[in-house]
């Protein structure tokens, strides 16, 4: 059983490195967001496998929190990109001008 878990962690580690390389080299921003989401998911899976391997089942809670933070990260990045492409920077500048000093 331990050998299988070690092989799974090695394969996930290799996949994480390949996805990180793809995220750095790719040009489209949407593909980068998808790579970030995949990295978060694979890291959560690695933490879960590690918790079974080490018999530390409290690491599953860490994996759940990491998954939630990874999801929020992707949502916030998508929101910022959407604001940028819809002219959100101009809206923010307009709000700054309206605030009295």
Image (cartoon, rainbow, N blue to C red):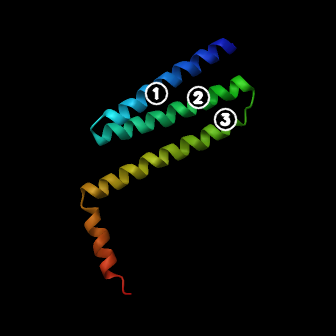
Of residue 10 and residue 86, the one placed in the foreground of this image is 10
Residue at position x 46%, y 27% in the image:
17
Residue linked to disc 1: 17
SS label for mark 2: helix
Residue 42: percent from left, percent from top: 51, 30
Crowding near pointer 2: few (<14 within 10 Å), some, many (20+)? Answer: many
Crowding near pointer 1: few (<14 within 10 Å), some, many (20+)? Answer: few
Position of residue 66 relative to residue 57, above or below, is below
Give how far apart the Cα atoms at labels 1 and 3 are. 23 Å
Position of residue 9 relative to residue 27, above or below, is above
Residue at position x 54%, y 45% in the image:
68
SS label for mark 3: helix
Give how far apart the Cα atoms at labels 2 and 1 are. 13 Å
Residue at position x 32%, y 33% in the image:
25
Which mark is first along the chain, 2 or 3? 2
Residue 47 is left or right of residue 89, and the answer is right
Of residue 86 and residue 43, the one placed in the foreground of this image is 43
Which quadrant holds the C terminus? bottom left
Q: Nearer the viewer, mark 2 or mark 1?
A: 1
Residue at position x 59%, y 15% in the image:
7
Crowding near pointer 3: few (<14 within 10 Å), some, many (20+)? Answer: some
Which quadrant holds the N terminus? top right
Residues at marks 1 and 3 touching, judged by CB atoms closer than 8 Å: no
Position of residue 24 relative to residue 95, above or below, is above
Q: Nearer the viewer, mark 1 or mark 3?
A: 1
Residue linked to disc 2: 46
Q: Nearer the viewer, mark 3 or mark 2?
A: 2
Which mark is first along the chain, 1 or 2? 1
Residue 18: percent from left, percent from top: 42, 26
Query: Which residue extends farthest bottom?
Result: 101
Residue linked to disc 3: 60
Residue 64: percent from left, percent from top: 61, 40
């Amino acid at each position: 059983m331990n050998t299988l878990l070690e092989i799974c962690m090695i394969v996930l580690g290799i996949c994480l490195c390949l996805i990180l390389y793809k995220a750095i080299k790719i040009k489209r921003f949407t593909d980068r967001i998808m790579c970030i989401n995949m990295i978060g998911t694979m890291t959560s899976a690695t933490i879960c496998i590690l918790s079974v391997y080490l018999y530390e089942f409290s690491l599953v809670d860490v994996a759940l929190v990491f998954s939630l933070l990874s999801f929020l990260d992707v949502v916030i990045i998508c929101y910022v990109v959407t604001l940028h492409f819809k002219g959100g920077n101009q809206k923010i500048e307009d709000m700054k001008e309206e605030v009295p000093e």
